[in-house]
Image (cartoon, rainbow, N blue to C red):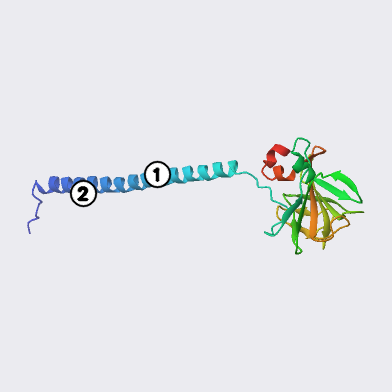
Amino acid sequence: MKKRRLKRFVLPSLFVLVSVTAFFGIAILNNILLGDELNYDYSKSLMKDATQAVLSEQKEEKKEIYKPYVSNNVTKKVGYYEKDASEEEKENSLIVYEKTYMPSSGVVYEADEVFDVIAVFDGKVTNIKEDEILGNVVEITHNTNLITYYYSLSDIKVEIGTEVKAGSILGKATTNKIYNEKNNFLFEVYYQGKSLNPEKFYSMNIDDLQ
């Protein structure tokens, strides 16, 4: 029986066919891989930009100082006494007790109903005492230079050493020997030992008061 031999052109043809198939296969695979890499790099770039934008926004975000109450029915009864204010403003910033006029070193807030008094910023309760005229006082130290005082409180929710956050309830406003017709409290701010006008304090940057 005679052995059959492949014709001469068959092997070269097979070689060319395999080579072409391999070439196109590698090209297609390369495009797929490169396409994924490009998409990955693009997505990674977008994620990086978005992350940087969020971090930048958080870094620039101002730390909010709260007002010491949340009720919409609270009004200002006595303002902070400032020497360069108008005569009318000075008159409205005097506390009168037993026929004695005293310039207010804070702001007195009042309302017909009982209302919560809250911490204006993060800090630590460093003292709770009783004032002979204004009742219970809560002292909060926010940093080495900044202290706030909340006079005339009842139902106190904190104790000395309590760490509080901005908005934490300290107690409720009540009456005292000076103002006994409505629920009220006196709020004071001291920076480096000197009193600040609370109503100006609310719009300040806490980082500037370190």
> Which mark is nearer the camera, 1 or 2?
1
Q: Decide which of 86, 133 is in the foreground and name it.
A: 86
Residue position for label 1: 42
Whether residue 162 sits left or right of residue 53 in the image: it is: right
Left or right: residue 54 compared with residue 189: left
Q: How many numbered callouts?
A: 2
Q: Residue visible at 86% across and 58% down?
A: 176
Classify residue 200 by image quadrant. Answer: top right
Residue 147 seen in the current view = no
Residue 12 visible, this orientation: yes
Amino acid type, residue under disc 1 in the picture: Tyr
Among numbered discs 1 and 2, the one appearing first in the sequence: 2
Amino acid carrying label 2: it is Thr
Classify residue 28 as left or right of residue 193: left
Image quarter where the C terminus lies is top right
Q: Position of residue 148 (x, y in %)?
A: 79, 47
Q: Is residue 160 above or below residue 34?
A: below
Which residue is drawn at the image coordinates 9% and 46% (left, top)?
9
